[in-house]
Image: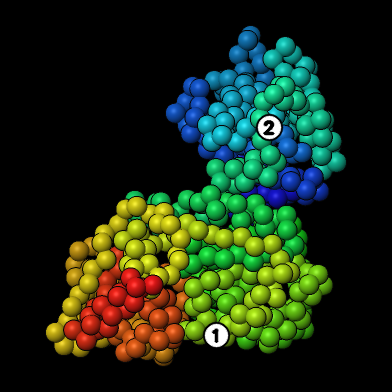
Amino acid sequence: MILIPDLADVEATTTSNAERRVARLLRAIDGTPDAVAFHSVKLRSHAVKQQGEADFVVLWNGVVIIVEVKGGGVRKYDGVWYSIDRHGDWKKLRESPMDQAQSAMYALRDILQEEGVGWFATEAVALTPDIDAPPAAVEWKGSHWWAKEQMSIAALTQAFEKVAGEARTAPHGIRVARSETLRARLFGEFTRMPVIDAQRGAVLEEQNRATEGQARVLAALSRNPRMLVFGGAGTGKSLVLAEGAKQEAGEKKSVLITFHSPALVDFFGPRIEGRDIDLLPFTDLSGDKQYDVVFVDEAQDLMNAGGMDALDAVIRGGREGGRWRMFLDPNNQARVDGEFDPEVCELVQQEALQYDLDRNVRNTRAIVHVVQEYLGADVGDPGIVHGDRVEWRWSAGTAGVSAAETVARDLVANGARRQDIWIISVSEDAEPRRSEAGFLVTNPRYAKGLEAEHVIVCDLPQAYDDRGLAAFYVAVTRARVTLHVVASKHDKKRLQDLLRKQVGK
């Protein structure tokens, strides 16, 4: 069964040994094709609390089953429920484990019905893994209180089957939620994209939430052997890829993430740390090892005959019969560093299900509008409504790294952290370096696929041909919070000409 977040994250974050044990069993269950379990689900609507929580929400055969886990001893005495720890100390509970499960079930049902998904069956289960099950009572069915005898893969599978099989059926004439819609909504409600060290301010908070489009892709990845995911810069392709790879590795599949730019090693490394996932730049693939699942980021760089042949060699079953996911930008960043063959792309499209990410979760609305106005590039609808306007710094002289450093110093003086600032020299091609003032100076070739909170773009192209346009596109779409463009009077004229071309299209 798919576990969200994956088992490594659950074991690292939960303080409950009982929940860890249950998570391990859920992960090992070979359930129905749509089976998925979400751990520690926060519920914004709750009858008695401002925010409730469900220990596990499990989708099984189209039935949503809420599981409340209570480790240690649990006992009802004189009408009051108590938990009993390993020292024999009793602690009064506000409500029984079954009442907790049922109230979470009602809250979840209200949330999803507000979303308009339609009617769906819900069931509430209490699980006390350290004790025998109490006898059935008027408050619950015996089949809905699981205990230590259910703590095996076979017994837990049978328990899910029984509860789902006895679930209520839809009333006559009411619209029933489609299984695919329900699954995608669950992913959307409860999946959060992990963005490292990104909790400062409203902009970053909005960027951390999975959009409906990202959730839809995550839900589809688990069910389809081959997928092409299209999305402009900032639509969250790489984050979805990392989450998808973790899901596949959690199912004990051999997983490879590959890409053209070696700089992406630093992006993916922290996000898959501790997982059995190979992370290799495309040039390091030897073809000696094959993988159950292959993920390709920035696939437009490899969309050529040689690239596809190399991928074919590392996918178990080959490209036509194997399991792979390619994420690519339709705005064709390959002109910066890579080779894109549209005929090859057309052939690959015939081999896979295709999805579009159309919500920009990196760039603020102001940045999205600049990209659309000057480049006509589709980077999705702006999902981040906060943020400052794009700052144009017009320089009387040269508009290179020295002028960009002046802007960077101003940002630091106003509270930005030095390590969160990038200077992107559009016309450079060398490896990233540190400026005299200690700021990172990079270029589109090495920045592609990555992001920074504050970006200062300088050394604009001398000509906006295909390569110049692609380089400018990459540079201005890296910023998460603020974007500054340093330009000379000659740059200004070329930008005005570029804008007129886009208006005339």
Give me the residue at 59% from left, 25% from top.
Answer: 106
User: Residue 198's spot in the image, x, y percent?
Assistant: 41, 58
Which sits in the foreground, 117 or 386?
A: 117
User: Residue 22's spot in the image, x, y percent?
Assistant: 71, 41
Q: In which quarter of the image is residue 391?
A: bottom left
- Identified by mark 1, the residue type is Gly
Quadrant, the C terminus: bottom left
Give me the residue at 47% from left, 84% from top.
Answer: 336
Q: Can residue 417 be seen in this view?
A: no
Q: Nearer the viewer, mark 1 or mark 2?
A: 2
Q: Please say if 46 is above or below 306.
A: above
Q: Distance between the residues labelled 1 and 2?
A: 47 Å
The residue that label 1 is drawn on is: 338
Q: Please indicate whether residue 403 sits to the left or right of residue 46 in the image.
A: left
- Identified by mark 2, the residue type is Val
User: Residue 448's spot in the image, x, y percent?
Assistant: 46, 76
Q: Please say if 272 is above or below 287.
A: above
**Tag 2, which secondary structure?**
loop
Give me the residue at 44% from left, 85% from top.
Answer: 466
The residue that label 2 is drawn on is: 176
**Tag 1, which secondary structure?**
loop
Which sits in the foreground, 7 or 83?
A: 7
Q: For label 1, count other residues whose C-alpha is less than 10 Å away and answer few (under 14), some (14-19) or many (20+).
A: some
